[in-house]
Image: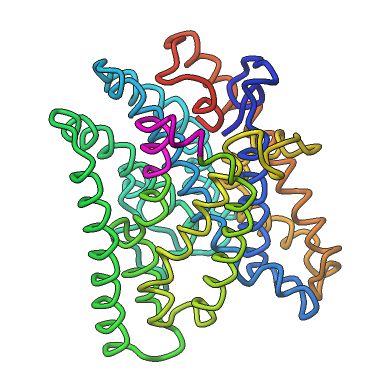
Amino acid sequence: MTTSQRSGQPLNNADRLPGLDLLRSLAIVWVMLFHSFLVGGLGADWAWLSRYGWMGVDLFFVLSGFLIGAQVLAPLSRGRKLSLGDFYLRRAFRILPAYWAVLLLYLWWPAFREAPGMEPGWTFVAFVMNLSIDYGRNSAFSHAWSLCVEEHFYWLFPLLAVALFRRPAVWKFAALCAALVLGGIALRAAIWAQGMQADPGLDRNWFIEDLYYPTWARLDGLLCGVALAAWKTLRPAAWLQARRHANRCLLAGVLVLAFSFWLFQDRVGLLGNTVGWPVLSLGLGLLVFAAAGRDSLIGRRELPLAGWLAAISYSLYLVHKAVYHLVQLQWGASLGGGGLVAFMVYGGAALLAGAALHYSVERPFLQLRRRLSPAPLATHSQRNPT
């Protein structure tokens, strides 16, 4: 996540990438709007704000692929050895403390859960919940699925990058990307056909369990981010030259994103769940490219509160669904009917809880991480979200 709020270490303004802060803050707000369905939604007049909010997670994936990818590739591109121990230690300090704190609340305080049933605790500890969830019965803390995908990425990508750099070649990377994209389309098509044959009804829990949550079906966003990182790290001159067109890429990203909305008109349909994912990732990747510098409209200036919201977004993601539930238990009757006023109450409570988790758990461990591993794996902007 971002800068001084994220790491506890002041940075010069030149080190900031406000565009990435903005995208991260938009992603978490978009996800929160989507999850408003847990407490009755935003009402008919504002439902359009939340309809595609699940795409906020895919924006997180592209951002993570870009920033973590650059951290891993930077030393390798300079002929240096990647310290896997340091990488995994930094990831552990970054991810685990806040995650474990929230997991303990889910396990020890059943009233905290936004749904009665929950997968066994060990599946969350091992980050395999997304591979075996019974969503119809155990949907509490199910949004941890995206953390499982991220964790699998952290485990495997550095090892794959080290292997590829033993005999680096552009064609190898291009072939791997093509295989993952085309393989993902074919795999999701097969899963979709099998799921529709087994259970074509409206419930369709198979969509969540077999198609939406599993890591092997959700690699497009991370892959797009890694491709951006490889371009920036391995072809810096071409990257800088392309940045002259950052605003055109921003516009193209918005248009491609709008096209992905059309592809996902039916969220569980075949079209969206085959070609829709790479198209969505491409659109989000163009936005991330535009945001990854100060030479675009989206990256030129820091917007008020965007950096702070980006800084607490991880903690906010962890707690927002449970906080919605707690607010509904206490004041749901008086907030009935949904709408923006109700969401402001729910969202405000989630912001307070997310900030409390960030400042009491997440930030102290990031400060401890900095003392134990003071040298970042890569330079500047890759510190932005990590």
Choose top left, top right, bottom left or bottom right for residue 91.
top left
Nearer to the camera, 50 or 277: 277
Residue 348 horizontal side relative to residue 81, left or right: right
User: Residue lying farthest left?
Assistant: 167
What residue is at 71 percent from the left and 48 percent from the top?
350
Q: Magenta stretch?
A: 226-241
Please state the horizontal and vertical placement of residue 296, each as a whole percent of the image: 67, 41
What residue is at 63 percent from the left and 31 percent from the top?
17
Q: How is the image coloured?
A: rainbow
Please state the horizontal and vertical placement of residue 354, each as a whole percent of the image: 66, 40
Instruction: Using the image, determine if residue 286 lies above or below residue 383.
Output: below
Nearer to the camera, 124 or 57: 57
What residue is at 43 percent from the left and 59 percent from the top?
118
User: Which image quarter is the N terminus in?
Assistant: top right
Our reading of the magenta stretch's main secondary structure is: helix
What residue is at 25 percent from the left and 57 percent from the top?
178
Does the magenta-highlighted stretch encompass residue 49? no
Instruction: Using the image, determine if residue 112 lies above or below residue 99.
Output: below
Nearer to the camera, 12 or 341: 12
Does the magenta-highlighted stretch encompass residue 234? yes
Instruction: Using the image, determine if residue 13 lies above or below residue 114.
Output: above
